[in-house]
Amino acid sequence: MSTPHRQLRRIHALDDFEPAARRLLPRPIFGYVYGAAETGASQRDNRNAFDEIGFLPRVLNNVARRTQKRCLFGREWSSPFGVAPMGVSALTAYRGDVVLAESAARAGIPMIMSGSSLTPMEDVARAAPESWFQAYLPPTLERIEALVDRVARASFGTLVVTVDSAVRGNVENYRRAGFTRAC
Ligand SMILES: Cc1cc2nc3c(=O)[nH]c(=O)nc-3n(C[C@H](O)[C@H](O)[C@H](O)COP(=O)(O)O)c2cc1C
């Protein structure tokens, strides 16, 4: 195994990132990433649903040719996982969207750039041309067409449309943490 980056030496599992991020990030920004709406009931339900999924060990099978590779939208990815769109990632790390996109490209998995990114979409597409783009659709057809044209011109091959934000979640935790943004 290669030597991990100094900051990753104490990270042994995904859950270890949370206390590390809490120490590193300004409180409002940590609050934004960490926050779930209201009492966190939906977040807990989602977590519980994942916890019910288990692995079924099948022993004494030939595992010499095992693979996690999957085909999706006409190309092969090295794993059936990807990076979900996360807004304002440039606040959590310097040019965070580009970092995520380049890392995903190195790992051979899809990365979805958020439509509420602070980085121009063209920069992400240039850095990692296989990235996907997520859009919150604007209210008029004219603006939707302009957005889709720009996404296509930037050479994104896959457009993801988020449909569950017609009514925004009431994330009280943002207000507790002092996180606000203009849009
Ligand atoms: C900090 C943060 C920012 C997010 N920003 C976006 C966004 O800009 N667009 C979007 O469609 N979903 C956004 N999401 C939702 C995620 O893409 C994802 O759907 C959600 O977190 C559920 O997946 P998970 O269980 O893997 O966290 C965001 C989630 C988090 C935690």
Image (cartoon, grey):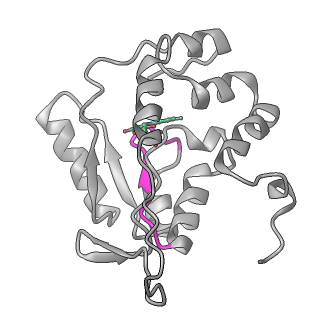
Q: Which residue of the protein is positioned furthest toward the front in this rendering?
A: 60
| Among the 4 quarters of the image, the one containing residue 16 | top right
Give the residue at x 64% y 9%.
Answer: 176
* Magenta stretch holds residue 95: no
Q: Main secondary structure of the magenta part?
A: loop
Residue 32, given in percent of the width and then of the height, sits at 59, 26
140 w.r.t. 167: above or below: below
* Magenta stretch holds residue 114: yes
Give the residue at x 61% y 18%.
Answer: 179
The residue range painted magenta reads: 108-118
63 w.r.t. 87: above or below: below
Q: Which residue of the protein is positioned furthest toward the left in this rendering?
A: 141
82 w.r.t. 175: above or below: below
Residue 135, given in percent of the width and then of the height, sits at 31, 42
- In the displayed structure, does residue 122 sit left or right of residue 154? right
| Among the 4 quarters of the image, the one containing residue 49 | top left
Give the residue at x 77% y 77%.
Answer: 1
Please state which of residues 79 and 135 is positioned toward the viewer in this rendering: 79
- In the displayed structure, does residue 161 sit left or right of residue 124? left
Answer with the quadrant where ligand 1 appears in the image.
Answer: top left
